[in-house]
Amino acid sequence: MDSSSIADLRKDYTLNGLRKEDVLKNPIDQFKQWFEEALASEVLEPNGMVLSTIGKDGYPHGRVVLLKDVNSLGFSFYTNYLSHKGEELAQNPVASLTFWWPELERQVRILGKVVKVSESESDTYFGVRPRGSQIGAWVSAQSQIIANREILVEKLATLEAQFADQAVPRPAHWGGYRVLPHQIEFWQGRPSRLHDRLCYTYELNEWKLERLSP
């Protein structure tokens, strides 16, 4: 594929509109509504989101992770605290989240500070993960350079034997983060690239809603 054929890729968005009078006052409630609609529309991995953090090099670093909880406090995901993202959040605890649901022609962008969830929350979620995922949290020194895949396979076999016939404990280096939003933007695709963008910003203990130009 050459650059000209990439430039020719385009889609006109026609499914829905987005008006200020139709959205909920609280953006987290509005997100939950859109998320339920994404589930009903059988969006592939509706909880997949691009998590962007700021590296020590000053560049934004993005990767896809999975949303595991959303409540009145914010949006939660789980990972290795010693990974690149964990190190970046320890140094600069802010992040953005981006959801893209093409089946609904919708995008949601979230910006906020980041805190660790409580140890009890991490324990509870770790306890319901598939056993293979639990052991995997012990196997991988996430983001570290390794010589080959066989290292992981051998370590997995060792740990499977070690944890045989017993519950797998949560590693101290693994747990959850919560993004505490102060800005949430809802984007709905519209014809002729005149998309609808409604942005909530938390100011003076309340959410302010504004329409943005596409």
Image (cartoon, rainbow, N blue to C red):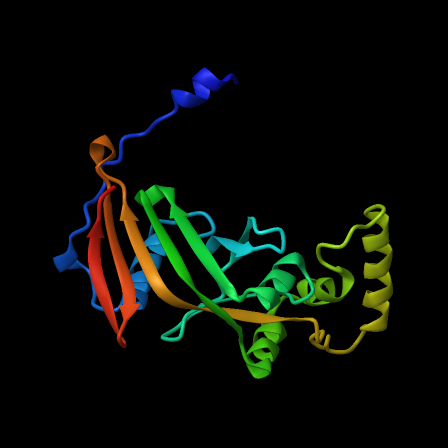
At horizontal 53% and vertical 67% (from top left) the residue drawn is 93
At horizontal 15% and vertical 52% (from top left) the residue drawn is 19
At horizontal 72% and vertical 74% (from top left) the residue drawn is 171
Q: Quadrant of residue 137?
A: bottom right
Lateral position of residue 124 relative to residue 31, left or right: right
Lateral position of residue 59 relative to residue 153, left or right: left
Please tell me whether residue 176 is drawn above or below residue 196 in the rendered image. below
Viewer-proximal residue, 114 or 196?
Answer: 114
Q: Quadrant of residue 155?
A: bottom right
Q: Residue 120: horizontal and vertical position, in percent?
A: 58, 83
Lateral position of residue 69 relative to residue 196, left or right: right
Q: Residue 127: horizontal and vertical position, in percent?
A: 62, 75
Q: Residue 133: horizontal and vertical position, in percent?
A: 67, 63
Lateral position of residue 182 relative to residue 203, left or right: right
Q: How many marks?
A: 0
Please tell me whether residue 172 is drawn above or below residue 35 in the rendered image. below
